[in-house]
Image: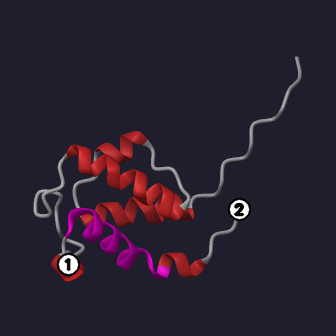
Amino acid sequence: MSRDPALLDTLEPTVIGLIAKHQRLEPDQITMESTFSDLSIDSLDGMELVFKFEEAFDITIPDDVARDLRTVRQIVDALRQAIEAPAAPAAPHTSA
C-alpha cells in the first residue's frame, strides 16, 4: 500500500493539532520537545491520543511502542516509522 508523500509533510502540524484539540491547548503552546508532563497528558490521555493518531493516519502503533511515548517528537517519529513501514502481507486464506 503506497502512502501519500504529503502525509509525511504534514505529520508534525497534524500531530500538534490533534494534541492541542484533545488537551484544549493552543497549537503554538506545543513544540516537538514538549513532554507529556508539560502538556498534562496522563496515561489515559496518552492512550486516547494513540487511538486518534492511528485513526487519523490509518496505521497501527504497536503497544510496546505506544507505552514508551513521552514526547511530541517520539510520537512523530513513531508515526513516521509506522507510515513508512511496508504494509504486512495478508495472511493466506486456508480452507478447512
- Mark 1 to mark 2: distance in Å? 34 Å
- Which labelled disc corresponds to residue 1? 2
Where are the magenta residues, as a range?
9-24
User: SS for tag 2?
Assistant: loop
On the image, the x and y values in percent for residue 11 come to 43, 74
User: SS for tag 1?
Assistant: loop
Quarter of the picture holding the N terminus: bottom right
Residue 12 is covered by the magenta coloring? yes
Badge 1 or badge 2: first in the primary sequence: 2
Of the residues shown, which amino acid type is indicated by label 1? Glu
Residue 22 is covered by the magenta coloring? yes
Quarter of the picture holding the C terminus: top right
Quarter-wise, where is residue 27 in the image?
bottom left
On the image, the x and y values in percent for residue 25 come to 18, 72
Quarter-wise, where is residue 72 in the image?
bottom left
User: What kind of secondary structure does the magenta stretch mostly adopt?
Assistant: helix
Callout 2 crowding tier (Cα within 10 Å): few <14, some 14–19, many ≥20: few
Quarter-wise, where is residue 20 in the image?
bottom left
Q: What residue is at 37 percent from the left and 40 percent from the top?
A: 64
Q: What residue is at 20 percent from the left and 83 percent from the top?
A: 28
Q: Horizontal placement of 44 versus 93: left or right?
A: left
The residue tagged 1 is 26
